[in-house]
Image: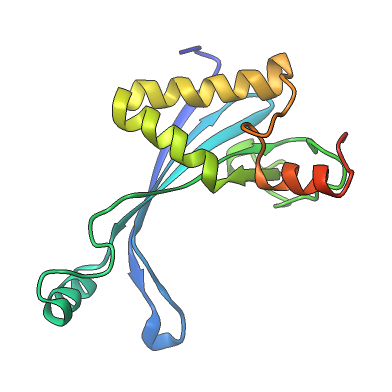
Amino acid sequence: MSSEFQRLVKWTPAYNHIAEGYGRHGMEVKFVLIGEQAAIQFVLYTNWMTAADRANEIDEHRGGGYCLHKPQPSDFGYHARHPQYKGQSIQAESCDYLGGAPCYYDGSGMRANKVFDVFTDGGEEALWKALEDEYQARFIVGVPVTVESANFGEVMAAFFGEQEP
């Protein structure tokens, strides 16, 4: 692992705001590799719900319940300082991962599954290497995007004929 990167692991607690007219969501963990040009992230929904939700699900389903333990890889993507394809719009005017700079984001839930396999089979260091490999390919070497490596926005841009930034 190169020393030019910062590693960040962010845990977000579960919540249940159904009574207020909103939803509920399990705890999630985000692994972010931050470099000079971009940040690469892998997001994993743990599906660990609040204690009250767990108690209610067990009561309602007699030990079953709604995804109370199965993790779900949800996103593998980047926060870039500059647009990566024509038509890409700013996701945030001030990105926490880019020191407050504007952020161009794109990611893929489908690609997250492969990164999850790397993580479960190789552990945390294998995950950090996968994030660094993605950073190197996209922002240093400039490997052309393929069907297998495309994020959602890139697929849409290609579909509508907008490829270059």
Residue at the spot 46% in from the left edge and 80% down from the top edge: 22
Residue at the spot 70% in from the left edge and 22% down from the top edge: 139
Closer to the camera in the image, 108 or 148: 148
Closer to the camera in the image, 83 or 155: 155
- Relative to 155, residue 138 above or below: above
- Relative to 137, residue 24 above or below: below
The quarter of the picture where the C terminus appears is: top right
Residue 77, percent from left and from top: 59, 39
Q: Quadrant of residue 124?
A: top left
Q: Is residue 96 visible?
A: yes
> Is 165 left or right of 105, judged from the image as shown?
right
> Is 1 left or right of 49, judged from the image as shown?
right
Residue 106, percent from left and from top: 67, 44
Residue at the spot 88% in from the left edge and 43% down from the top edge: 162
> Is 134 left or right of 72, judged from the image as shown?
right
Residue at the spot 52% in from the left edge and 38% down from the top edge: 41
Residue 138, percent from left and from top: 68, 24
- Relative to 53, residue 87 above or below: above
Applied colour scheme:
rainbow
> Is 9 left or right of 64, judged from the image as shown?
right
Q: Is residue 102 visible?
A: no
> How many marks can you see?
0
